[in-house]
Image (tube, grey):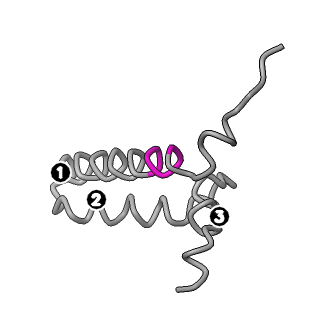
Amino acid sequence: MRQDFGDIMWPDNTNHILIAIFIVLVAAKLGEVWSRRLGLPQVLGELSMGMLLGNLHLFGGWQFFNFIREMPFLKVL
């Protein structure tokens, strides 16, 4: 019988943080390309994708970024 030691070996959210950073960077790049095709400044596309990702739980119910909000050291801030 195989046991899953994932929680013991990786008690922190390092892999989730890396995936979240990857998603944010890819979304920013897609927004940059999208705004360039529309003839708008590239930073406008990056900002719009950031606003979309920030409110994604309202639009589609996707709760992937909730682990960031629930980190104990962020509750102190």
Q: Position of residue 13 (x, y in %)?
A: 56, 52
Q: Position of residue 46 (x, y in %)?
A: 29, 60
Residue, x 61% and y 80% (percent of image)? 75
Q: CA distance from mark 1 to mark 3?
A: 27 Å
Dominant secondary structure (helix, strand or loop) of the stretch shown in magenta: helix
Q: Nearer the viewer, residue 1 or 49?
A: 1
Q: Are marks 3 and 2 in contact (CB under 8 Å)?
A: no
Relative placement, left or right, of 47 versus 61 is left
Q: Which residues are magenta?
A: 15-20
Query: Residue under circle 2?
Result: 45
Q: Secondary structure at mark 2?
A: helix
Query: Residue under circle 3?
Result: 58
Q: Quadrant of residue 45?
A: bottom left
Dot 2, how many residues are within 10 Å of its Cα: few (below 14), some (14-19), or many (20+)? many
Q: Are marks 1 and 2 in contact (CB under 8 Å)?
A: yes
Which of marks 3 and 1 precedes in the sequence? Answer: 1
| Disc 1 residue type (three-letter) | Arg
Query: Which residue sits furthest top?
Result: 1
Residue, x 58% and y 85% (percent of image)? 76
Dot 1, how many residues are within 10 Å of its Cα: few (below 14), some (14-19), or many (20+)? some
Residue 42 among magenta residues: no
Residue, x 66% and y 55% (percent of image)? 63
Q: Which mark is residue 36?
A: 1
Q: Secondary structure at mark 3?
A: helix
